[in-house]
């Protein structure tokens, strides 16, 4: 029986990928990098932890600063942008979260972002009260596409993987869901780039028509139930 829904955050709840990109673009500009950091370059790291994103930036641009130094600068820039421009929710995401909560399902966020940014973002769009748990892959040894963050989220909800379903927008996230043995709804977010979501159990282009019944049907089909 479906008892819990695990949400990725960036690109599923908050349309934050453009903000993450802009923050690191500004950091690189301040560091005087001559090569342009394009959105296409950034999109290749969508679904990774910020630590991994920064590692890729350092290697690509030959920076001498540490991962921690670049990450701290990037997180500060992201926070500044969010506070100035607000937190852009994915269309329909807030309404879906409320629907699923009101239907009695347990909800968790399982994101590759750092804990502070997860809490700040979820609070920024006013849905903190609907989530039972918020967990970060940044605190775990193995990020997506490994299943650790989703298995940990299910555990934190007090549920088995068999009782959960996941909503993801990245290839790494979908692969992590499948590795965890948890059914996955793949959300096609244009701002997340060309993500291969073919391993998801179903693909959607929006959340407006999704509700508890839809999630239960997907979960049942994934488990071979009528």
Image (cartoon, rainbow, N blue to C red):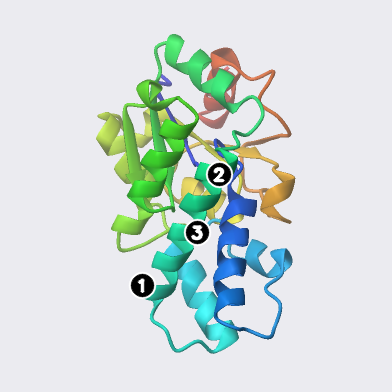
Mark 2 or mark 1: whose residue is earlier in sequence: 1
- State the quadrant of the C terminus: top right
> Decide: marks 2, 1 in contact (CB < 8 A)?
no
Please tell me whether mark 1 sits on a helix, a strand or a loop: helix
How many numbered discs, if any?
3
- Horizontal side, residue 30 vs residue 109: left or right: right
Q: Position of residue 89 (x, y in %)?
A: 59, 33
> Given this view, does label 2 or label 1 mark the residue nearer the observer?
2
Q: Residues within 10 Å of mark 2 (few under 14, many from 20)?
A: few
Left or right of residue 144, residue 135 in this image: left
The residue lying toward the viewer, choosing from 150 and 226, is 150
Q: Which callout, 2 or 3, points at the residue further toward the start of the chain?
A: 3
Residue placed at 69% from the left, 18% from the top? 209
Q: Residue at x 40, y 40 (%)?
A: 120
Label placed on residue 68: 1
Residue 130 x, y percent position in the rendering? 39, 21
Q: List x then y, in percent, for residue 157.
A: 29, 30
* Dot 3: element: helix
Secondary structure, mark 2, is helix
155 w.r.t. 191: above or below: above
* Label 3–label 1 contact, CB within 8 A: no
Label 3 or label 1, whichever lies nearer to me, is 3
Visible residue check, residue 145 = no
Q: Identify the residue at image location x=60%, y=52%.
A: 19
User: Is the residue marked by circle 1 packed among few (<14), some (14-19), or many (20+) residues within 10 Å?
Assistant: few
Among the 4 quarters of the image, the one containing residue 76: bottom left
Q: Which mark is residue 77?
A: 3
């Amino acid at each position: 029986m479906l008892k819990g829904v695990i949400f990725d955050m960036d690109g599923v709840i908050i349309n934050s990928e453009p903000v993450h990109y802009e923050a690191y673009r500004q950091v690189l500009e301040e560091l005087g990098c001559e090569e342009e950091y394009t959105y296409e370059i950034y999109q290749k790291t969508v679904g990774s932890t910020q630590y991994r994103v920064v590692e890729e930036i350092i290697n690509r641009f030959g920076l001498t600063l540490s991962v921690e130094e670049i990450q701290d600068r990037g997180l500060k820039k992201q926070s500044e942008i969010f506070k100035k421009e607000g937190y852009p929710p994915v269309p329909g995401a807030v309404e879906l979260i409320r629907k699923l909560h009101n239907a009695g399902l347990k909800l968790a966020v399982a994101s590759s972002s750092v804990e502070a940014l997860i809490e700040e973002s979820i609070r920024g769009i006013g849905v903190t009260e609907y989530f039972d748990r918020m967990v970060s892959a940044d605190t775990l040894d193995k990020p997506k596409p490994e299943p650790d963050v989703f298995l940990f989220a299910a555990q934190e909800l007090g549920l088995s993987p068999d009782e959960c379903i996941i909503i993801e927008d990245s290839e790494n996230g979908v692969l992590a869901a499948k590795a965890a043995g948890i059914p996955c709804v793949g959300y096609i977010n244009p701002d997340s780039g060309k993500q291969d979501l073919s391993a998801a159990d179903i693909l959607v282009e929006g959340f407006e028509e999704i509700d508890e019944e839809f999630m239960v049907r997907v979960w049942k089909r994934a488990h071979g139930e009528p």
